[in-house]
Each structure stands twice: as C-alpha cells, then as structure tokens.
Amino acid sequence: MRLTAAVVFFIFTLFSCSDGKLEETKDPVSSVSKDSAPANRSERPAANPYNGVDVSPMDMVYYPVDYPKLKMAHTLTTPPLARVIYSRPHLQGRHIFHEVLKYDEAWRLGANEATELTLFKDAMVQDKKIKAGRYSLYCIPHTDTWTIAINSNIDTWGLEPDTARDVARFIVPVVKTRNSLEYFTMIFEKKDPEALLLMAWDDVEVRLPFRF
Amino acid sequence: MKKALALLFVFQVIFMSLMAQTLPPVDKSPMDMSYYPANYPVLKIQDKATEALAARVVYSRPQKAGRTIYGGLVKYGEIWRLGANEATEIEFFKPVKIDGKKVAKGRYTLYAIAYESSWTFILNKDTDTWGAFKYDQKKDVLRVSVPVEKTTEPVESMSMGFEKTNTGFKLVIAWDTVKAGLPISL
C-alpha cells in the first residue's frame, strides 16, 4: 500500500515537474513572439503552392548566446561574434550510428544546405587562427573522436564537401550521454574564456572551442 | 520498503535531470532560407548555376493556424517583422537597385508595413536582432510600396522565394491569401 502511494506520489511529482518545464520553455518565446502563439490547430492546413515546410527545419544560433534577444533588450551593444545556420534532421526511430551516419564518412552537420559558420571577427579555434568571414562546416565522425572541418566552399548543398577547400580541421572528443536527443542540435555554450560550439544528436555530443 | 522508496527517489532524480535539459526545442515557426538564383546551392553542386549568386533571405515561417492574419495578427499600418523570432535578414552579394536607389552589398533587416491594398517594404541597417520590437526608423536604408495580389489558394506557412524578372529579380512573399513582391534590379 505504501509502495502504491509512493508510486502515485512519484508519478505526480514527475508530471508536475514536466508541466513546469513546459511552461518554462514556452515563456521566453510567447513573451516576445506574438505570431508563434499556439492557436486552433484542428483545421487541416492548406497545401503550400510556393514552398513546403521542410521535414528538417532550419535553425540559427549566435554567440554571445541569444544575441538577437539581448540586442533587442538593449543589454548588449557590441556586435555579435559568431553565428551558425543549420538544418535539424531528426531520428524518427533510427539510431545515429549506423542508421543515419557512418563512421569515417563525411557528414554535413545538418541537412539540406551546407551548415554555415559566420565569424564576425577573427577567432582562435582550438589552436588555429581563423579569419572573420563565412564558412561551411562539416564533420567526419569516428567512434571516440569527430573531425570537424571549416571549409571555404559556401552557399552550397551539403552532400559532398569539397575537401580541397578545407581551411582547417580539428579533432574533438566524443561524449556519450545517457539520454537520446531526437533533433540534431547545435548551440554555443559560454565557458569563459571560451565559447564551445556544441553539436549533439542521439547519445553523442562533441564540442569545438572558440576564443575571440 | 525503504529500498523501494530510495530506488524510486533515484529514478525520479534521473528523470528530472533528463527533463532539465536546456537544449533548444524545435521552433514552432521553423527557419528557412531562399537564394537568388532560386535553389542556388543545389544548382551549384550540379554545376547548373548560370547566374552569379545575388541574394539570400533568411526568415522564420509562422503558420496561419486558423487565425485571421491581415487586420488581426498583422495589424494594418504597423511595423511587421515579416516572419517570426529573429528579424528577417536579406543579404545582397553584389550591389543592387531597389526603386531606383543603389543598395550596397551586405546584410540588411527586412520589415514591412501591411495595408489592405499595398505593403511598404523597409530595408534597415540594424541586423542580428529579434523581431521588430526595437525597430529604429533612423537606420532605414529605404522604403518602397508595392501593391498586393491575392493568392490562388491560402498559404498556411509564410513563404518567401525569389523570381526572375526582366530587370533582375523580385522577392515574393506569400502568406494566407495575400502576396507581394519586392522588385530588385541588377
């Protein structure tokens, strides 16, 4: 009986926790973006004759983290340092290895267009100086490390990177996580004095360090 | 019994730590990009690009989701971010002309003001910002008004794409039952 009560209590706290978290993630968005507020979704969406919404949606991350929001709030007056634009494939029941990616084969770090890195000023990436500018990014995953390449071939589709145009290559360690991440995710993490570009999918995470 | 409770506590801590993950969720209004020439990245890998890269727009795509868009969500006569989330960015890879005015190559923010029969497009120098909440008219590069057209069928997710014209190209923006084009000449 006490066990049943404990289980009920456990489930209750679990749900209250997840509700709280949902509210938390929703708030920063709804407070600033009126036009992505939830609405009646029961209507069948009309077909889009122009440009259908992609199965792997695009996303964009800045360093400093959340730069556009900080700029809007006037808490930052300096220019941004870096930006990544990438598309976000999802697992849909697959495992990252080997059902989506293969070890030792180049991957565009995303989907569709080649993933783009903009450095708004010169940066040290690991121990190499990379000049300000736009680049493409891709990786070659291995079991314990990933090779990350910064490449000068931009505005291109991501399928076959032009390795002859690599600007630099970096080797970063793989960190295994206990949980699986459904959508491929890139984000800058502030870890003074570095900015870490996190690349995470399924149970794998790698981080590339930048200094500005 | 104590063991069972302790075990439950451990599981709960694990579950809560999983939920406390701070990675960004997928946006309700996903981002997208369009190039001129249209589909430039695909043409490029197929060696089929016949024109040089001229422009790119990066925007987020709100959905109609049963709502009244014009005169409702998008108020007539008010500044509109022409998308969702981050301000819509248009980049020119070479100098262009809009409404007879020279526009240097570079990145700009694109806003609009919708009216019932026309839209005013606004090219602004303040980039890398969020929405139109801190729109600063002093940073305008130019404004141009264009008539709106009706779409043949309602467009659920806001769409942007470039189309070739006699003098260059235009950025066509369609959402719900309205579309408008920003003419750009080379």
Image (spheres, coloured by chain):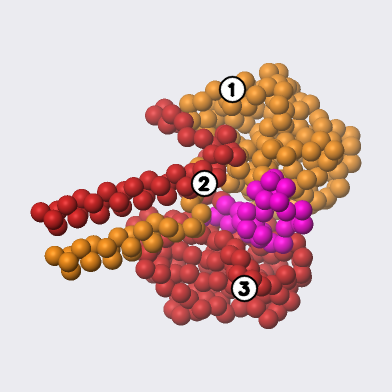
Chain colours: A red, B orange
| Residue B151 falls in image quadrant | top right
What segment carries the magenta color? A59-88
Q: Secondary structure at mark 3?
A: strand
User: Mark 1 belongs to which amino acid?
Assistant: Gly
Instruction: Report how far apart the C-alphas of labels 3 and 1 lie in the structure.
Output: 45 Å
Chain identifier of the residue bearing label 1 in the image: B
Instruction: Report how far apart the C-alphas of labels 2 and 1 lie in the structure.
Output: 22 Å
Q: Which mark is residue A209?
A: 3
Q: Secondary structure at mark 2?
A: loop
Q: Quadrant of the N terminus of chain A?
A: bottom left
Q: Position of residue A92 (x, y in %)?
A: 38, 55
Of labels 2 and 1, earlier in sequence is: 2
Mark yes or no: residue B153 visible: no
The answer to whether A36 appears left or right of A124 in the picture is left
Q: Is residue B81 magenta?
A: no
Q: Give above or below for A198 relative to B180.
A: below
Crowdedness near tag 3: few (<14), some (14–19) or many (≥20) residues, C-alpha within 10 Å: many
Q: Quadrant of the C terminus of chain A?
A: bottom right
Q: Position of residue A45 (x, y in %)?
A: 45, 31
| Residue B153 falls in image quadrant | top right
Q: Position of residue A54 (x, y in %)?
A: 51, 46
Mark yes or no: residue A129 visible: yes
Q: Give above or below for A40 relative to A138.
A: above
Q: Is residue A83 magenta?
A: yes
Instruction: Report how far apart the C-alphas of labels 2 and 3 lie in the structure.
Output: 26 Å
Crowdedness near tag 1: few (<14), some (14–19) or many (≥20) residues, C-alpha within 10 Å: few
The answer to whether B101 appears left or right of B21 in the picture is right
Q: Which mark is residue B72?
A: 1
Name the residue located 37 percent from the left edge and 68 percent from the top edge. A178
Chain identifier of the residue bearing label 2 in the image: B
Name the residue located 20 percent from the left edge and 50 percent from the top edge. A8
Question: Which of A205 and A169 lies nearest the eye of the viewer?
Answer: A205
